[in-house]
Image: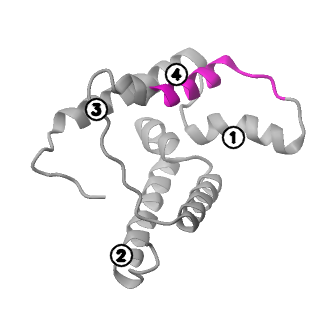
Amino acid sequence: MDIDWTRFTPWTALAGGAVLGLGTALYLLGSGRIAGIAGIVASPMQALFRGAPWRPEVNRLLFVLGLLLAPWAWQLVAPLPAAAVDVGTAGLVVAGLLVGFGARMGNGCTSGHGICGLSRFSLRSLVNVLVFMAAGFATVFVLRHLLPGVAA
Protein backbone atom coordinates (compact mmCIF):
# COMPACT_ATOMS: atom_id res chain seq x y z
CA MET A 1 0.00 0.00 0.00
CA ASP A 2 1.32 3.42 -0.90
CA ILE A 3 0.14 6.78 0.39
CA ASP A 4 -0.42 9.47 -2.21
CA TRP A 5 1.23 12.31 -0.28
CA THR A 6 0.40 14.87 -2.97
CA ARG A 7 -3.33 14.41 -2.28
CA PHE A 8 -3.09 13.92 1.48
CA THR A 9 -4.93 16.45 3.61
CA PRO A 10 -5.33 16.23 7.36
CA TRP A 11 -9.06 16.99 7.11
CA THR A 12 -10.18 13.47 6.28
CA ALA A 13 -8.02 12.04 9.07
CA LEU A 14 -9.38 14.65 11.48
CA ALA A 15 -12.96 13.90 10.43
CA GLY A 16 -12.37 10.16 10.79
CA GLY A 17 -10.89 10.60 14.24
CA ALA A 18 -13.80 12.80 15.30
CA VAL A 19 -16.33 10.25 14.07
CA LEU A 20 -14.48 7.43 15.87
CA GLY A 21 -14.37 9.47 19.07
CA LEU A 22 -18.05 10.36 18.83
CA GLY A 23 -19.02 6.76 18.08
CA THR A 24 -17.04 5.31 20.97
CA ALA A 25 -18.33 7.98 23.36
CA LEU A 26 -21.93 7.33 22.33
CA TYR A 27 -21.42 3.58 22.68
CA LEU A 28 -19.98 4.05 26.17
CA LEU A 29 -22.79 6.39 27.21
CA GLY A 30 -25.48 4.20 25.68
CA SER A 31 -24.30 0.79 26.85
CA GLY A 32 -21.76 1.44 29.59
CA ARG A 33 -19.23 -0.69 27.69
CA ILE A 34 -15.96 -0.01 25.93
CA ALA A 35 -16.21 -0.04 22.12
CA GLY A 36 -13.52 -2.62 21.45
CA ILE A 37 -14.37 -4.73 18.42
CA ALA A 38 -12.73 -7.87 19.82
CA GLY A 39 -14.85 -7.67 22.96
CA ILE A 40 -18.04 -6.92 21.05
CA VAL A 41 -17.59 -9.85 18.67
CA ALA A 42 -15.98 -12.28 21.16
CA SER A 43 -18.99 -12.78 23.42
CA PRO A 44 -21.29 -14.42 20.85
CA MET A 45 -18.37 -16.37 19.36
CA GLN A 46 -17.34 -17.75 22.75
CA ALA A 47 -20.92 -18.80 23.44
CA LEU A 48 -21.10 -20.48 20.02
CA PHE A 49 -17.91 -22.50 20.54
CA ARG A 50 -18.80 -23.47 24.11
CA GLY A 51 -22.32 -24.50 23.19
CA ALA A 52 -23.64 -22.05 25.77
CA PRO A 53 -26.82 -20.09 25.26
CA TRP A 54 -26.33 -16.56 24.04
CA ARG A 55 -28.93 -13.87 24.00
CA PRO A 56 -28.46 -11.22 21.37
CA GLU A 57 -27.67 -7.79 22.73
CA VAL A 58 -29.13 -5.07 20.56
CA ASN A 59 -26.28 -2.62 21.18
CA ARG A 60 -23.66 -5.13 20.00
CA LEU A 61 -25.66 -6.07 16.93
CA LEU A 62 -26.23 -2.42 16.01
CA PHE A 63 -22.54 -1.63 16.49
CA VAL A 64 -21.45 -4.43 14.14
CA LEU A 65 -24.20 -3.48 11.68
CA GLY A 66 -22.85 0.08 11.70
CA LEU A 67 -19.37 -1.23 10.88
CA LEU A 68 -20.75 -3.22 7.96
CA LEU A 69 -22.85 -0.34 6.61
CA ALA A 70 -20.18 2.36 6.98
CA PRO A 71 -18.59 1.84 3.53
CA TRP A 72 -21.96 2.26 1.82
CA ALA A 73 -22.67 5.40 3.83
CA TRP A 74 -19.24 6.77 2.87
CA GLN A 75 -20.01 6.20 -0.82
CA LEU A 76 -22.81 8.75 -0.51
CA VAL A 77 -20.16 11.39 0.20
CA ALA A 78 -17.08 10.27 -1.73
CA PRO A 79 -15.74 7.26 -3.61
CA LEU A 80 -14.13 4.51 -1.59
CA PRO A 81 -10.35 4.44 -1.80
CA ALA A 82 -8.86 1.70 -3.92
CA ALA A 83 -7.86 -1.34 -1.90
CA ALA A 84 -5.03 -3.61 -2.93
CA VAL A 85 -3.95 -6.76 -1.14
CA ASP A 86 -0.45 -7.79 -2.11
CA VAL A 87 -0.26 -11.02 -0.15
CA GLY A 88 -1.59 -14.48 -0.86
CA THR A 89 -4.37 -16.37 0.89
CA ALA A 90 -1.96 -18.19 3.20
CA GLY A 91 -0.47 -14.87 4.30
CA LEU A 92 -3.92 -13.46 5.03
CA VAL A 93 -4.88 -16.52 7.07
CA VAL A 94 -1.66 -16.42 9.09
CA ALA A 95 -2.03 -12.66 9.62
CA GLY A 96 -5.63 -13.07 10.79
CA LEU A 97 -4.69 -15.81 13.22
CA LEU A 98 -1.81 -13.75 14.61
CA VAL A 99 -4.03 -10.69 15.05
CA GLY A 100 -6.65 -12.80 16.81
CA PHE A 101 -4.01 -14.38 19.03
CA GLY A 102 -2.54 -10.98 19.86
CA ALA A 103 -5.94 -9.50 20.67
CA ARG A 104 -6.68 -12.44 22.94
CA MET A 105 -3.29 -12.25 24.67
CA GLY A 106 -3.56 -8.46 25.04
CA ASN A 107 -7.10 -8.75 26.42
CA GLY A 108 -8.40 -6.48 23.68
CA CYS A 109 -7.76 -5.13 20.24
CA THR A 110 -6.39 -1.93 18.80
CA SER A 111 -9.75 -0.22 18.91
CA GLY A 112 -10.38 -1.11 22.54
CA HIS A 113 -6.88 -0.23 23.74
CA GLY A 114 -5.90 2.42 21.21
CA ILE A 115 -9.05 4.50 21.17
CA CYS A 116 -10.88 3.75 24.39
CA GLY A 117 -8.06 2.69 26.69
CA LEU A 118 -5.69 5.52 25.85
CA SER A 119 -8.48 8.07 26.21
CA ARG A 120 -8.99 6.76 29.77
CA PHE A 121 -5.23 7.02 30.46
CA SER A 122 -4.95 3.25 30.98
CA LEU A 123 -1.35 2.15 31.48
CA ARG A 124 -2.25 -1.38 30.36
CA SER A 125 -3.66 0.04 27.12
CA LEU A 126 -0.55 2.14 26.54
CA VAL A 127 1.65 -0.94 26.89
CA ASN A 128 -0.62 -2.92 24.55
CA VAL A 129 -0.61 -0.19 21.90
CA LEU A 130 3.18 0.06 22.06
CA VAL A 131 3.44 -3.73 21.64
CA PHE A 132 0.92 -3.72 18.76
CA MET A 133 2.85 -1.00 16.97
CA ALA A 134 6.25 -2.61 17.58
CA ALA A 135 4.97 -5.95 16.28
CA GLY A 136 3.58 -4.24 13.18
CA PHE A 137 6.83 -2.37 12.51
CA ALA A 138 8.86 -5.54 13.00
CA THR A 139 6.58 -7.56 10.73
CA VAL A 140 6.77 -5.03 7.91
CA PHE A 141 10.56 -4.79 8.25
CA VAL A 142 11.02 -8.56 8.18
CA LEU A 143 8.64 -9.14 5.27
CA ARG A 144 9.89 -6.24 3.16
CA HIS A 145 13.63 -6.33 3.87
CA LEU A 146 14.64 -9.73 5.23
CA LEU A 147 12.14 -12.01 3.46
CA PRO A 148 10.87 -9.97 0.49
CA GLY A 149 9.68 -12.94 -1.54
CA VAL A 150 7.57 -14.48 1.22
CA ALA A 151 4.88 -11.79 1.38
CA ALA A 152 3.94 -12.06 -2.30
Amino acid type, callout 2: Arg
Foreground disc of the pair 2, 3: 3
Q: Earlier in the sequence, mark 2 or mark 4?
A: 4
| Crowd band around label 3 with a 10 angstrom C-alpha radius: few (<14), some (14–19), many (20+) | few
Residue 144 image offset from top left, x and y in percent = 35, 76
Foreground disc of the pair 4, 1: 1
Q: Quadrant of the N terminus?
A: bottom left
Magenta residues (range)? 54-69
Identify the residue at horizontal 55%, vertical 62% (top origin). Answer: 95
Amino acid type, callout 1: Ala
Circle number at residue 97: none
Q: Is residue 69 above or below residue 123?
A: above
Q: Earlier in the sequence, mark 4 or mark 1?
A: 4
Which one is in front, 11 or 126?
Answer: 11
CA gap between label 2 and label 4 equals 38 Å
- SS for callout 4: helix
Residue at which label 3 appears? 79
Which one is in front, 33 or 93?
Answer: 93
| Crowd band around label 1 with a 10 angstrom C-alpha radius: few (<14), some (14–19), many (20+) | some
Identify the residue at horizontal 25%, vertical 37% (top origin). Answer: 13
Residue at which label 4 appears? 27
Identify the residue at horizontal 48%, vertical 25% (top origin). Answer: 69
Residue at which label 1 appears? 42
Q: Is residue 64 magenta?
A: yes
**In the figure, is residue 7 to the left or right of 47?**
left
CA gap between label 3 and label 4 equals 27 Å
